[in-house]
């Protein structure tokens, strides 16, 4: 039997789907399931191995998450990550303690190179830690394979049982040799076959939608970004004219964006209708400062607009959205903590009139969406278009949204996009934008005192939006940006550059 699948059991960690994604990068199909799913409910055909994810709980809590114990009787290799390590240690009779200090961020790791999991990994490297609890007593039959100065057991294994575990997160880019470790497990230990291709996913999801929703009319929330554009194209290939795409101008778009987006969609062959609801959105947002409230107001009113349009389009019962996995994670999934609500996930009203949501990209990361878009014929320029959040500039104006503040963000953002393109970095920098801050700063303009706002520039590099680093923009470019924004945009008195990584920050400020 061909071994071509890895199952990841979800204990509520923020990077669970990232584990799936890393396995897929190796050319091996992987799927995510709730940690407490029964073995009877799983399709075990082709199963090469199982990975137990991280999670926010303590295994010492009475109500902590558990897996079906029969997974350890399947005879396939198992890898535990973070909570997964602690869970395995506890199940096999070890002990877990909660020390005074946790361990978070980049940490030096020492490994035992005799372990197959650390084949071709230097004895010392940098990994990403994110834990409070740690092993105080190793389970019988297991041996220590890695450690840090603050974590006596950062890796363990039981070769006889084919069980391996690490306290850190090899799936995040901050773990220097994490991809090699995962490859050692998936390809070396599990001997999984590399048969996964994005074309297979495209055909699979198109066929599933065509079969499940045959004859059903749908409305697609089209933002102009790559996610919604790819989602719309997928569904259009599945149900054709039964899909009506709606592009809503909510008054929170970038400079000239509405016209540019509609021009682009003419070439995609999609059935698109533009709805100007800017006055409605800005009226509802007047006086609102809390970011979560803003997101929910925007999400709720989007649905209200789509419901109106659905009635005009044959009383469509389904709403298509370009939700991708980082949106789901940050909005809080089954067992994960909420970071912030996304308008197309946590910001939706519970009583909306649609019978259901269709989210074909829900399990994919941004770069996977781009790869999928290319494979189904979405134009290159659209695939590589700057990511733009559904709430738009509403979350790039800190605090209350006003026309004046929106105009400052539009103009500074336009300058940023122009200069990034002039520098030839528009496909190298993953996402870049400006933020209006409620900070006033003293300056000198025309030999007179000025007192204007601080504008922040955010530019990041990533492949998955789950972990990012600030882009190392050339200093000369930053100087040009500062000079142009202060001189060309009224109300700007100082420009700062945000160098915060994710985690601990997020990409957007709100």
Image: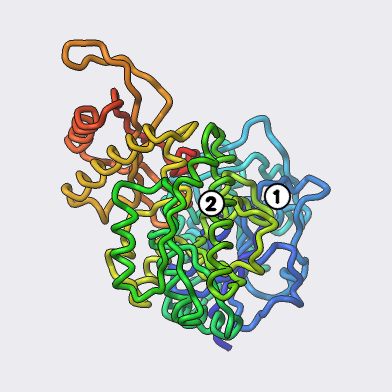
Number of residues whose C-alpha sits closer than 10 Å to that of mark 2, classed few (under 14), some (14–19) or many (20 or more): many
Q: Residue at x 46, y 41 (%)?
A: 395
Q: Position of residue 401 (x, y in %)?
A: 46, 35
Q: Position of residue 95 (x, y in %)?
A: 75, 46
Report the front residue among 61 and 330. 330
Report the front residue among 386 and 286. 286
Is disc 1 placed on a helix, strand or loop?
loop
Q: Residue at x 47, y 69 (%)?
A: 24
- Considering every residue shown, the one lying at the far top of the view is 448
Indicate which disc, 2 or 1, sits on the residue closer to the N terminus. Answer: 1
- Considering every residue shown, the one lying at the far front of the view is 312
Is residue 377 depicted above or below 111 in this figure?
below
Residue under label 2: 169
The N terminus sits in image quarter: bottom right
Q: Residue at x 79, y 45 (%)?
A: 61
Left or right relative to 331: residue 21: left
Residue 73: mark: none
Marks 2, 1: nearer the viewer: 2
Report the front residue among 158 and 28. 28
Residue under label 1: 138
Q: Residue at x 50, y 46 (%)?
A: 281
Left or right relative to 263: residue 339: right
């Amino acid at each position: 039997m061909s071994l071509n699948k890895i199952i990841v059991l979800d204990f509520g960690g923020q990077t669970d789907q990232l584990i799936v994604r890393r396995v897929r990068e190796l050319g091996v199909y992987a799927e995510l399931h709730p940690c407490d799913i029964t073995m009877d409910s799983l399709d075990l055909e082709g199963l090469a191995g199982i990975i137990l994810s991280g999670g926010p709980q303590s295994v010492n809590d009475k109500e902590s998450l558990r897996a079906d114990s029969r997974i350890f009787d399947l005879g396939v290799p198992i890898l535990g990550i973070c909570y997964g390590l602690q869970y395995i240690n506890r199940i096999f009779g070890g002990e877990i303690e909660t020390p005074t200090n946790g361990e978070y961020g980049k940490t030096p790791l020492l490994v035992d190179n005799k372990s197959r999991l650390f084949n071709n990994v230097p004895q010392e490297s940098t990994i990403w830690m994110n834990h409070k609890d740690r092993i105080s007593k190793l389970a019988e039959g297991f041996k220590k394979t890695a450690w840090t100065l603050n974590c006596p057991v950062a890796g363990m294994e039981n070769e006889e049982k084919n069980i391996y575990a690490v306290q850190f997160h090899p799936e995040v880019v901050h773990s220097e040799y994490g991809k090699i470790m995962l490859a050692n497990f998936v390809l070396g230990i599990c001997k999984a076959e590399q048969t996964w291709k994005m074309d297979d996913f495209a055909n699979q999801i198109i066929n599933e939608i065509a079969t499940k929703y045959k004859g059903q009319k749908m409305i697609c929330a089209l933002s102009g970004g790559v996610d919604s554009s790819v989602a719309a194209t997928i569904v259009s290939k599945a149900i054709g004219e039964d899909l009506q795409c709606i592009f809503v101008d909510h008054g929170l778009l970038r400079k000239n964006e509405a016209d540019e987006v509609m021009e682009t969609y003419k070439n995609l062959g999609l059935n698109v209708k533009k709805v100007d609801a800017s006055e409605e959105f800005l009226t509802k947002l007047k006086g609102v400062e809390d970011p979560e409230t803003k997101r929910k107001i925007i999400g709720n009113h989007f649905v209200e607009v789509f419901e109106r349009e659905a009635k005009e389009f044959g009383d469509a019962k389904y709403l298509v959205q370009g939700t991708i996995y980082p949106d789901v994670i940050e909005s809080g999934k089954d067992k994960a903590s909420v970071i912030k609500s996304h308008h197309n996930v946590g910001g939706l009203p519970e009583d909306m009139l649609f019978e259901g949501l269709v989210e074909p990209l829900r399990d994919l990361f941004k770069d996977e969406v781009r790869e999928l878009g290319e494979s189904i014929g979405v134009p290159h320029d659209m695939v590589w278009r700057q990511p733009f959040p559904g709430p738009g500039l509403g979350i790039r104006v800190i605090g209350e949204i006003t026309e004046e503040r929106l105009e400052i963000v539009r103009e500074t953002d336009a300058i940023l996009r122009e200069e990034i393109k002039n520098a030839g970095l528009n496909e190298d920098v993953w996402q870049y934008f400006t933020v209006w801050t409620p900070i006033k700063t003293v300056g000198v303009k025309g030999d007179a005192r000025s007192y204007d706002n601080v504008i922040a520039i955010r530019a990041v590099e990533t492949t998955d939006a789950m972990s990012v680093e600030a882009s190392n923009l050339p200093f000369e470019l930053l100087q040009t940006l500062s000079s142009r924004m202060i001189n060309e945009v009224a109300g700007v008195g100082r420009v700062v550059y945000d160098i915060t990584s994710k985690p601990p920050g997020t990409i957007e400020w709100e």
